Image (cartoon, coloured by chain):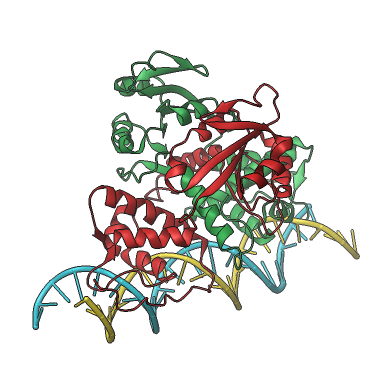
Chain colours: A red, B green, C cyan, D yellow
DNA sequence: TAGATTGTTAATCGATTAACAATC
DNA sequence: TAGATTGTTAATCGATTAACAATC
């Protein structure tokens, strides 16, 4: 319960599997629920049970990044939350750009879930004159031509693409030119980017396809699909 | 080029890795783009290059389900599209229920990407009297109490949850009670479901977290994150 | 102390890659 | 035929699980 020394956590310079990082986000979400429900501490077996993972996996995942638990005791929720946020990089504030203010773009502008994790959409972009100058959910819509300028002013490092598929690659190129370092692409196309820019693709129809597959082939594979 | 015999494809009764199925969706999307661009055939190396996978992986993935290619020739796009749709179960029409007509729910009701893959949102549900009876993007909004009735009438097997996190589990329970067999959950909570109901979780904030991690830790892990 | 739970190692399991005979 | 490309096997690589000493 006491902190004997600032215990130097082995700064994991070994490559961290992608799957581990995605479970980290789930642990964080679950820990936040536990705290909201008044829990102060938890254990690898409780976290595992809540998420459908083994206790061994939870411990192994966390141990990639340091010694966050206390043998015989478990994990302090607060501490673990802080640690995971630090690992994920969400211990800071991330200004985010949204490109595209159609149905999906507008919905994402209003999505409350982002701000809880430190993401703040600070500017939206479009090329439709009808939409430029408007303020949606408190976010100003600029012409895409002003991307470089506005991104620099607001120190924007992350961008989301919510434009029609045929426009996505060109938008991605412009985000890169504006110095953006990471992109979430909601357009249903594979975009190609320089090696130094990270990206995540989210295709909503594909999520339904995965579901369709697992419903149709329910016979064997028991359980769920992705999270 | 000719079809000598209806060649009995080894009906993969061995368990198919989840990762294979998610790549199948990407192959399908890429094939559809190729066809739109006028291509008639493709190869494992072309598909791999377009998506960032090895040619061996593409062949192995497809071979789980049958013999779709022609040695020395490659794959006919049309045939492969048909085959993958059959495997994914998107060779048919899926009526889908949307629960929740807030920002996100409304955006999804208007999302065109679903219909291209055979998904048709045929009814929306809410509990806010203000919203009930409305028609959004051509979809009628019913009170959640009418879920059982409307789901049966429309033979709805799939549902999407776009309600606030605290309401998600209760909604999931009602979808199950209404005979729904698969759920895409957009609420940022883990929902628990009976074994015979499949589900996929999509947490938009988590996508940004994954991006944040890979931007912050750009040093080692080169490339992208998820697709 | 006895009971609980961690971090870590070794064993198992699964997925990806490389290589190549078969085929067009 | 020579060149291209598949489907599949074996080899490699990586991730998960089981087990347990160390710790509280």
B158 lies left or right of B179: right
B19 lies left or right of A169: left
Say which residue appears at 47% left-offset and 54% top-offset.
A90
Give the farthest residue toward the top: B133
The answer to whether residue B110 is visible is yes
Give how far across and how far down residue A57 sits, in percent.
Answer: 37, 65
Instruction: Say which of A101 and A18 sits in front.
Output: A101
* Screen quadrant of the N terminus of chain A: bottom left
Give how far across and how far down residue D21 sits, in percent.
Answer: 28, 86
Q: How many marks?
A: 0
A180 lies left or right of B64: right
Instruction: Say which of A79 and A190 sits in front.
Output: A79
Q: Is residue A31 above or below residue A10?
A: above
Give the farthest residue toward the front: A153
Q: Is residue A54 above or below residue B119?
A: below
A84 lies left or right of A204: left
Say which residue appears at 41% left-offset and 18% top-offset.
B141
Give how far across and how far down residue A84 sits, in percent.
Answer: 41, 60
Give how far across and how far down residue B182 sits, in percent.
Answer: 40, 37
The answer to whether residue B76 is visible is no
Say which residue appears at 51% left-offset and 43% top-offset.
A120
Instruction: Say which of A92 and B150 sits in front.
Output: A92
Instruction: Say which of B128 and B71 sits in front.
Output: B128
């Amino acid at each position: 319960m006491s902190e004997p020394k600032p215990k130097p956590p082995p700064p994991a310079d070994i490559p961290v599997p992608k799957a581990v990082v995605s479970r980290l986000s789930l642990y964080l979400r679950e820990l936040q629920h536990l705290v909201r429900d008044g829990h102060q501490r938890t254990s690898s077996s409780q976290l595992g049970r809540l998420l459908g993972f083994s206790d061994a996996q939870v411990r192994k995942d966390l141990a990639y990044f340091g010694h966050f638990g206390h043998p015989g005791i478990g994990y302090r929720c607060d501490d673990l939350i802080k640690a995971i946020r630090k690992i994920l990089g969400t211990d800071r504030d991330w200004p985010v750009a949204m490109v595209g203010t159609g149905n999906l773009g507008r919905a994402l502008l209003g999505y409350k879930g982002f701000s809880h994790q430190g993401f703040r959409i600070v500017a939206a972009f479009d090329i439709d004159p009808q939409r430029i100058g408007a303020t949606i959910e408190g976010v100003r819509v600029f012409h895409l031509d002003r991307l470089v300028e506005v991104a620099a002013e607001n120190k924007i490092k992350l961008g989301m693409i919510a434009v029609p598929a045929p426009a996505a690659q060109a938008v991605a190129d412009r985000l890169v030119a504006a110095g953006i370092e990471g992109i979430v692409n909601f357009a249903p196309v594979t975009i190609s980017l320089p090696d130094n820019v990270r990206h995540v693709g989210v295709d909503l129809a594909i999520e339904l396809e995965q579901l369709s597959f697992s419903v149709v082939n329910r016979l064997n594979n028991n359980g769920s699909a992705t999270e």
